[in-house]
Image (cartoon, coloured by chain):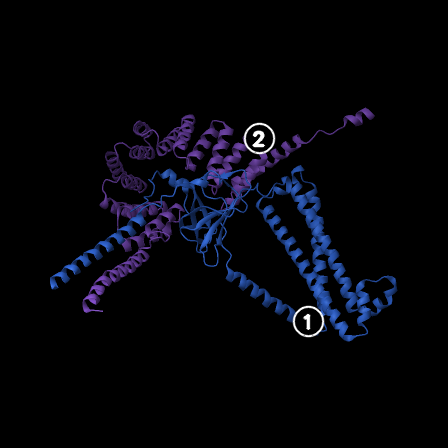
């Protein structure tokens, strides 16, 4: 074989080798980037998952480790604020909401939450200022106005609160958040019919809120519509089965309906869920058992003493 | 010549860069692009998926009808506050099968090994319920993890070891002169325990007798317990008679041969002539009794479990003694699920805005 031919062959082999090297590199890259594998949750997503399960200490832990790895951002600071708020640590909540505002000073959710946290701390002026800022930022949405209405409702100015709720309804009528809080205002104002309607409207737009169903049930109970009350308590229990208060409310409505056996079951369920021995539950049970006995006696078939009478 | 070589190198380099770029591009596109598979999506919660893969096949009645869409971990806080991680597996039933494969609510998903060299697969055992799981919903029942070969082998090894130990113990027992006395005492103690249990239940009966018409289930439980106790008493009495005959009343039994004594006497009569046969038969006797004792103990354990459960139900809801009720009626019993450590209603009332899902 001549030298020319060998050189020619060597030239032809070089691209093949390079291609093989590149393919190996490609596979390596695919393996490193995790192509085809199961996607893993980031620390932020884990934190969000823990929030969904109301496990705030763990959520906070995850968000802090997210900050260590990726630095601060609007989402993580805001979520930390929410965690501390729900834990009742308002100072920390304010600190994190203010940090979140450094990343986006026009974020409506952060402004509203910060305003409501200030309100919890008794800083009324700062609270109203933040809530109005939110209303300016979110001109088409109802929730900043609802938050202002909440501010007035909690500071005892119910008429002013009603004005804001009405304005919010004109902005965005299909808001579960709006109708739920409007319901609380009506209820506070002893207008149970309006309150029940508002709560029920809220459940139409947000069917995951047990508080709205409970509110509706409470109002229907006051309106002496026991059947609707039981129905709404059952919905609330379905969404939040660990709340003894719901079982007690349902039992009260069932008692009024004469469904004593079911009422007893609900009361014992409430007792089982209570962390302390609830005297209210026991009192109700003591009142209920005689009624239950009476009802059972009434259900017994009549004694056949006709036959005896005829025979004598 | 040198110029041509450098030109060739440049072309080679450019080619390499283009290929590298396109490979990286394809990898990134593949990662970002959705799979594009259409069909009905469901989710199943597992405690352990046993290494199920991302695209594993979903099998119904031996036919591949879909594939695993995603697998993600879900943190769970139990009622006692214990934390654990469960796995949510999303599946897609392919469009072709989406209409035919209707999933009843009591269906169970199992992870199975696909073969010696194949990966795992998800098998759906469809139930009989009238309610169905709709696309987008999660299966009500948790999925079952695969059975590991290692576990089976380990279990078999453990059983063999226990069996060996058991045989050794029986051999040791046979060498001990006091073994019959020991068994005798154990059975006497057990019988007296069962008698006490029977007596206790009889004492409870009048209380149950006063109950209303809805107390059938509790009464049934009581009857079952009675039957259980009487059966076991009979078994124990038989065992006791055999043991007493075998250990202490050999002469008497020998004398009673003509009066139709049990088969055991015939055996003992024959082994009296031969010490080796006696040892053999005694060995059989001990083994038989060991089985009886085991069965009796198992029955007693079941009975005590039932009693404990019944006691727990009564403790939870004493009104059962008066009104009875089915096991599913008491919403507070056997409740599982996470208990939030915050007041959810309070949070709802606070009016705060919800969390953000991305940073």
In front of the other: A287 or A92:
A92
Q: Quadrant of residue B38?
A: top left
In the rendered image, residue B341, in percent from the top left (x then y), is placed at 42, 47
Q: Is residue B183 visible?
A: yes
In the rendered image, residue A198, in percent from the top left (x then y), is placed at 39, 29
Left or right: B20 in relation to B330: left
Q: Quadrant of residue B216?
A: top right
| Chain seen in purple | A
In front of the other: A122 or B103:
B103
In the rendered image, residue B173, in percent from the top left (x then y), is placed at 68, 71
CA gap between label 1 and label 2 equals 67 Å
| Looking at the image, residue B242 lies above or below residue A169 | below
Labelled pair 1, 2 in contact (Cβ < 8 Å):
no
Residue at horizontal 81 percent and vertical 72 percent from the top: B272
Q: Residue furthest right?
A: B258
Q: Is residue B82 visible?
A: no
**Element type at mark 2:** loop
Quadrant, the C terminus of chain A: top right
Residue of label 2: A258
| Looking at the image, residue A46 lies above or below residue B344 | below
In the rendered image, residue A112, in percent from the top left (x then y), is placed at 29, 39
Residue of label 1: B173
Q: Chain of mark 2?
A: A
| Chain seen in blue | B
- Which of label 1 and label 2 is nearer to you? 1
Q: Chain of mark 1?
A: B
Q: Pointer 1: residues within 10 angstroms few (<14), some, or many (20+)?
A: some
In front of the other: A303 or B102:
B102
Residue at horizontal 81 percent and vertical 70 percent from the top: B270
């Amino acid at each position: 074989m001549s030298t020319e031919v060998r050189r020619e062959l060597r030239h032809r082999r070089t691209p093949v080798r390079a291609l093989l090297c590149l393919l190996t590199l490609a596979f390596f890259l695919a393996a490193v980037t995790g192509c085809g594998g199961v996607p893993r949750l980031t620390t932020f997503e884990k934190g969000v998952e823990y929030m969904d399960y109301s496990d705030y200490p763990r959520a906070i832990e995850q968000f802090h480790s997210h900050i260590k790895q990726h630095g601060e951002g609007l989402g993580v600071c805001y979520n930390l604020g929410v965690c501390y708020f729900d834990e009742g640590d308002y100072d920390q909540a304010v600190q994190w909401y203010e940090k979140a505002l450094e990343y986006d000073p026009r974020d409506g959710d952060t402004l509203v939450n910060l305003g409501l946290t200030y309100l919890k701390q008794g800083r009324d002026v700062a609270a109203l200022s933040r809530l109005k800022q939110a209303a300016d930022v979110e001109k088409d949405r109802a929730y900043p106005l609802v938050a202002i209405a909440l501010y007035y409702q909690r500071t005892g100015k119910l008429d002013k609160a009603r004005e804001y709720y009405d304005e919010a309804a004109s902005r965005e009528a299909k808001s579960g958040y709006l109708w739920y809080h409007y319901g609380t205002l009506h209820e506070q104002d002893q207008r149970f019919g309006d309150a029940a309607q508002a709560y029920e409207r809220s459940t139409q737009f947000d069917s995951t809120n047990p508080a709205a169903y409970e509110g509706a049930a409470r109002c229907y109970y006051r309106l002496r519509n026991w059947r609707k009350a039981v129905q709404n308590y059952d919905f609330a229990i379905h969404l939040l089965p660990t709340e003894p208060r719901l079982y007690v409310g349902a039992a009260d409505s069932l008692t009024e309906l004469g469904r004593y056996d079911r009422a007893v079951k609900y009361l014992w369920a409430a007792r089982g869920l209570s962390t302390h021995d609830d005297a209210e539950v026991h009192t109700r049970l003591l009142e209920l058992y005689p009624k239950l006995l009476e009802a059972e006696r009434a259900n017994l078939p009549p004694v056949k003493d006709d036959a005896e009478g005829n025979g004598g | 010549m040198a110029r041509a070589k450098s030109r060739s190198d440049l072309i080679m380099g450019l080619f390499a860069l283009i290929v590298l770029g396109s490979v990286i591009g394809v990898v990134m596109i593949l990662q970002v692009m959705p799979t594009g598979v259409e069909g009905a999506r469901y989710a199943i919660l597992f405690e352990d998926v046993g290494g199920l893969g991302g695209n594993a096949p979903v099998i119904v009645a031996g036919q591949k009808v879909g594939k695993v869409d995603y697998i993600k971990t879900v943190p769970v806080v139990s009622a006692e506050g214990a934390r654990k991680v469960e796995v949510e597996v999303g599946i897609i039933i392919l469009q072709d099968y989406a209409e035919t494969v209707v999933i009843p609510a009591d269906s169970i998903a199992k992870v199975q090994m696909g073969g010696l060299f194949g990966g795992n697969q998800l098998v759906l055992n469809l139930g009989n319920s009238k309610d169905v799981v709709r696309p987008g919903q999660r299966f009500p029942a948790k999925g079952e993890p695969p059975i590991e070969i290692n576990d089976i082998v380990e279990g078999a090894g453990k059983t063999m070891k226990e069996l060996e130990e058991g045989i050794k113990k029986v051999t040791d027992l046979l060498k001990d002169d006091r073994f019959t006395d020991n068994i005798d005492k154990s059975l006497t103690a057990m019988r007296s325990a069962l008698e006490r249990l029977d007596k206790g239940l009889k004492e409870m009966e009048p209380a149950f007798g006063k109950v209303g018409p809805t107390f059938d289930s509790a009464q049934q439980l009581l009857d079952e317990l009675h039957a259980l106790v009487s059966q076991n008493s009979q078994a124990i009495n038989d065992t006791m008679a055999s043991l007493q005959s075998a250990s202490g009343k050999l002469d008497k039994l020998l004398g009673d041969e003509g009066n139709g004594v049990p088969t055991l006497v015939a055996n003992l009569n024959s082994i009296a002539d031969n010490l080796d046969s006696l040892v053999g038969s005694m060995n059989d006797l001990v083994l038989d009794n060991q089985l009886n004792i085991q069965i009796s103990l198992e029955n007693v354990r079941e009975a005590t479990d039932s009693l404990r459960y019944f006691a727990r139900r009564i403790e939870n809801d004493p009104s059962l003694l008066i009104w009875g009720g089915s096991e599913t009626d008491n919403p507070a019993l056997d409740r599982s699920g996470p208990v939030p450590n915050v007041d959810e209603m309070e949070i709802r009332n606070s009016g705060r805005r919800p969390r953000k899902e991305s940073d």
